[in-house]
Image (spheres, coloured by chain):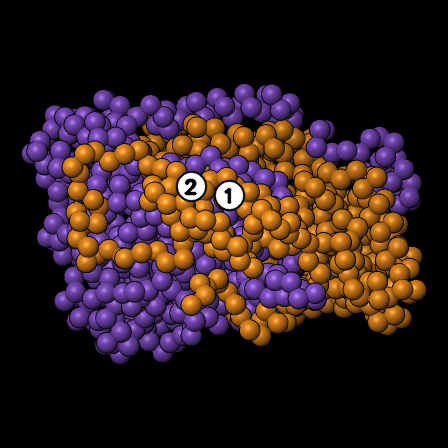
Chain colours: A orange, B purple
Amino acid sequence: MASAGRIGPVAVSETSSTPHRIEPVAGVPLIFELSSEGRRATDLSPRAAGERRGAEIIGVELCREDLPGFPELSEPQVLRHFLRLSQLNFAQALQFYPLGSCTMKYNPVVNDELAALPGLAGLHPATPVHLAQGALELLARMEAALAEITGMDAVSLHPAAGAQGELTGLLMVRAYHRKRGEVRHKVIIPDTSHGTNPASCTLAGFEVIVAKSNRRGYLEAAEVRRLVSDDVAAMMVTNPNTLGIFEPEIQDIAAALHERGAMLYLDGANMNALLGVAKPGHMGADIVQLNLHKSFSTPHGGGGPGAGPVAVKKHLEPFLPMPRLKHSGAGYEFDAERPDSIGRMRSFHNNFGMIVRAYAYILALGGDGLGMASRLAILAANYLRKRLQPHFPSATGEPSMHECVLSHELEKRADVSTLEIAKRLLDFGIHPPTIYFPLVVPGALMIEPTETESKEILDSFVDAMERIYDEALNDPERVKNAPQNLPVSRVDEAGAARHPILRWEKKA
Amino acid sequence: MRFMPQTESDVAAMLETIGARHLDDLIAHVPASLRASATIKLERGLSEADVVREISALAARNTGASGFLSFLGAGYYRHYVPAAVRAVIARAEFATSYTPYQAEASQGTTQAIFEFQTLITQLTAMEVANASMYDGASAAAEAVLMARRLMPKRPVVALSRALWPEYRATIRTYLSALDGLDIVEVPFDDATGATDLSALDRIANDRLLCMVTGYPNALGIIEPLGALAQMTHRAGGLAISATAEGIALGLLRAPGELGVDIAVGEGQSFGLPLQFGGPGVGFMGARLTHLRQMPGRLVGQTRDRDGRRAFCLTLNTREQHIRRERATSNICTNHSLCALAATVYLSLMGRAGLRELAERNVELAHQAAAVLEAAGIRRRFSGPFFNEFTLKLANPSAALEAAERRQILAGVALGNDYSELSDALLVSVTEMNRGDEFSRLAAAIAEVR
Ligand SMILES: Cc1ncc(COP(=O)(O)O)c(C=O)c1O
């Protein structure tokens, strides 16, 4: 394999993995530390005899000398390296992963196979549309399905993630008001909102006004009426909100906004509570974004990719981003005549690979199955809430939807923090809930079990939480020193921020 | 339902614990008017076999996905994806984990991201790189926003007209809501296809915020990035490069070597399928001094309590979940699994392999251009090119049609995006093309010339 003709002696050094030393699982060297000069994991088919090299053709002055530090390994080494890394992760497929607001439900494996079909994975985005009708039809069907699910009039699959969907929606709001000759500067956001909401507002040029939820954890239309003015372009509401509560006054809130010409933007990240339960369109939403990597089961990939389609009411349809699908006699094509469109947010059409998976999921569940998914997700959250109530009471007295936010007194009683509880859960092979969010609940534990976990799993989670509660009172050091059973012990995050080391560098 | 484990008796037991009788009791507090109209009118659910049948039938109708010789590029490139890349990203341990907020349970993901960041800094010769962006176009838009945060007083955003049309359009959308910015297009030289230095010179003054250049550009040309960066710097502006064909960075001088301040691009070429345009993966490299204004996640190296090396998300006070409306970006979910694919791909290609692959792309593209030239088909521009070049044709759409009749996708007509290039066809050649294909392409195009 080594075309340089040299397979050097195996270097024995502190950082390299050698056959003589069995390493602790934690010590996977960096790929760069496994390199050995001249080793390679790829072979090209041979160059024709006498052909000039690329660098000579374009001129060496345009070329770099080398790729210093770049990996030099054989294929089996590369594979082993990444497979060993994979073993250091918790994952939904392996563990209970009740991370609130993230909807870590089962990701059907067949969907990955479908996305990889040559007719889908091998399709170039610049393929003439008449040779890509299957893909366009899939997109059109997905748009229609999401419109039905949300009760909205039109859907764009363009945005790459939830946050990009938010920005897309807010830019549409802005374009809509402009078109009517109005300039509005403000957007109302509840104090329970996700961080992407205010961040998207800033990018869309809006100033944020914070609405307070009431003591019961939801928004009152009266508060919205107090804040709304002719300078308010929209309000962003997450429903169910990040406390897991269905906003009971949502229709009245929509009316309050509409009376003053403002829009209701619904953050649909929590759609897993609403399937067949309540449609955003009927709540009065003008726009909703969906996170396909949450409610619609596309794998989260350690942080993405996802997809963040936006669904809108008719009056906003002209402003949807480009490109926009349309159907003509000859089939599907992209509509180039969209003078009011906000434009594009990214390259090409959309995160097609994720849309294929989500569409397959919708086909698998069907309308009834989607409705059942939300109901069982709500069942699981309420079950956990009830069972955990004695030691981890709910932060609100309102009914929970698909997730519950709990609090506890262990900080006061035993000086054990939410973070420490979370870390101790890891020792039980359970991924912790979202913690310290929403910000309005001190020490929050935000638990979203999803509909794809069995009762046995939910019960074992309760057992673990109860045991941690006992430990906190009787053996707090055990909790404070967690995790003990993982590849690494507590990671020094403060140290990482104080002295940022953001890349590997070759030792001089 | 096969994804939901609760049996009837589980449901009954859980309801009893809660103190409810029916599932719908749990949503009784949702306004009745909403519940009444909430039924989702879609077909009943399908078995796995029927889902496969349904999607496979749609896939089969994408006749352009196989069976054609392809020269399509224009921002997304056909490259061989080694099986090992797929084998890694298919691992559920990577694919079904969330953003690595719990470091101790995510050392696999965090270390892989750290390696990705390192590879991007090596490729671009920049000092820092983030954990990924959505794609090249949105990364370019975020780079301009970052420049604006660094120098809020400068209003002029210069975009090379030879920057990818979709990147320009995305930047315009991202900037559309921000006051006081002035987007100026810098024309390309009609002969070389490279950005016109003298045109940049005319606007290079203390109002210039940044200059964004494709490298290689949308006409296939390898831009004089060093000269453009120098001129931008003379005016005190920031030089931004945007690379859609990442393989080029294996051979061309690195943006960082040429003085670029922010190097962004699309990593689709690094082991990701075409997938009708997404998901790919955006990357961003920058200078250490600009770190605090960088968008997106970062992984840093640290230690655990026992002194072992460990990795975690860091410097997140820049990010939306901490900084909210004052965050450097709204990005949350990024393209992590795609960044992992790129990390595996680049590790496999390696120091020698990536360069050889890049060279092979150059060789094949130039071989193709020579075969076309011998058939009397000329290039539109004289500047140096990497693996993509522009042909000058009387009627590009007729050429595309003629080629399609011979089962060839000959390229992308530039007239849709550039009114001045209604005579131009962009042809992309990669290692997926074989030498014997070029005469077939030439014959097809020559037929209508
Ligand atoms: C309530 C809420 N809104 C918005 C988002 C942002 O979505 P994404 O991560 O897809 O950008 C999230 C998820 O992180 C969320 O939980």
In contact (CB < 8 Å): disc 2 and disc 1: yes
Closer-to-camera residue (A293/A331): A293
Residue A154 against residue B172 in the figure, above or below: above
**Image quadrant occupied by the C terminus of chain B:** top left
Question: Can you tell which quarter of the image residue A446 is in?
Answer: bottom right
User: How many neighbours does mark 1 have within 10 angstroms: few (below 14), some (14-19), or many (20 or more)?
Assistant: some
The x, y position of residue A319, in whole percent, is: 43, 51
Residue A154 against residue B180 in the figure, above or below: above
Closer-to-camera residue (A430/B75): A430
The x, y position of residue B224, in whole percent, is: 20, 60
Closer-to-camera residue (A490/B95): A490
Residue A328 against residue A267 in the figure, above or below: above
Specify the subunit that label 1 lies on. A
- Give the left or right position of residue B63, taking residue B112 as reference: left
Mark 2 or mark 1, earlier in chain: 2
Distance (Cα) linking label 2 and label 1: 9 Å
In the structure shown, which secondary structural element does the residue marked by tag 1 occupy? Answer: helix
Q: Which mark is residue A41?
A: 2
Reading the image, the residue beneath label 1 is A77
Tally of numbered discs: 2
Residue under the point 48% across and 62% down:
A504
Q: Amino acid at mark 2?
A: Ala
The x, y position of residue A5, in whole percent, is: 34, 42
Closer-to-camera residue (A377/A70): A70
Q: Is residue A327 visible?
A: no
- Give the left or right position of residue A177, taking residue A131 as reference: right
**Image quadrant occupied by the N terminus of chain B:** top right
The x, y position of residue B85, in whole percent, is: 48, 40
Q: Amino acid at mark 1?
A: Gln
Residue B407 against residue A249 in the figure, above or below: above
Specify the subunit that label 2 lies on. A
Residue under the point 56% across and 51% down:
A17
